[in-house]
Image (cartoon, coloured by chain):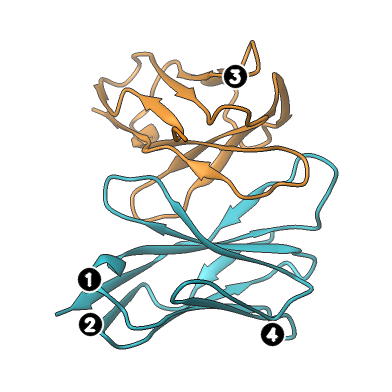
Chain colours: A cyan, B orange
Amino acid sequence: GESVGLHLPTLSVQEGDNSIINCAYSNSASDYFIWYKQESGKGPQFIIDIRSNMDKRQGQRVTVLLNKTVKHLSLQIAATQPGDSAVYFCAEMGAIKAAGNKLTFGGGTRVLVKP
Amino acid sequence: EAGVAQSPRYKIIEKRQSVAFWCNPISGHATLYWYQQILGQGPKLLIQFQNNGVVDDSQLPKDRFSAERLKGVDSTLKIQPAKLEDSAVYLCASSLGTGHYEQYFGPGTRLTVT
């Protein structure tokens, strides 16, 4: 079945450096992708999303890149801060329907920011 | 704006016992989701409601899990009887509805089955 996965389970990054988190997906019909951040003891928090008709989208200190040719998604965090330490999940949604759209989550990458 | 509320935050039960979780979504959100998150994994959708109707419950173990959203607002998820492998965080999320895909998550209920 379709799945979303991550290449690296843990990413250690120096404070101030840029972070890149990668995600591969298998459903070529996926139409919508989201990155979530989850801190310990909390629910996932929305970071940024992107539709399949785009290849790049920028937010505050974050950029999501989508490469549909190789079915790859990445999240770039600029000037990583201690507060960015968390587990990051990518999630994908299949072809958008009138109802019943659901997200499939990958396994997560832990980001550790070193002072 | 108040976020998604869940209770209890923690629950410890013995196997074969019953347990119920409660969720109050963001006001005005038509779609409500229950997820199971096993330690070290991403959330897995159990059931999705659109108002008070079930849209997707294909991954809900219906022999022991049940959920309802009778008035289209808050929702309960029940497990009866619990198994050891049900130990997980149960997350509730909500979204505005048709055409709005961003889901807002609650803090979750951590269930430990001993």
Which numbered disc flags the more N-terminal residue, 4 or 1? Answer: 4
What residue is pinned by disc 1? A82
Chain of residue at mark 2? A
**Residue B37 at x, y percent in the picture:** 42, 44
- In whole angstroms, how far apart are the C-alphas of marks 4 and 1? 32 Å
- In whole angstroms, how far apart are the C-alphas of marks 4 and 2? 30 Å
What residue is pinned by disc 3? B73
**Residue A39 at x, y percent in the picture:** 31, 55
Which mark is nearer the camera, 4 or 3? 3
Q: Amino acid at mark 1?
A: Pro
Chain of residue at mark 4? A
Asked which secondary structure carries label 2, the reply is: loop
Which mark is nearer the camera, 4 or 2? 2
- In whole angstroms, how far apart are the C-alphas of marks 2 and 3? 42 Å
- Local packing at callout 4 (Cα closer than 10 Å; few below 14, some 14-19, many 20+) is few
Q: Are marks 4 and 2 on the same chain?
A: yes
Q: Is residue A53 left or right of residue A82?
A: right
**Residue A110 at x, y percent in the picture:** 33, 68
Q: Residue furthest left?
A: A115
- In whole angstroms, how far apart are the C-alphas of marks 3 and 1? 37 Å
What residue is pinned by disc 2? A15
What residue is pinned by disc 4? A70
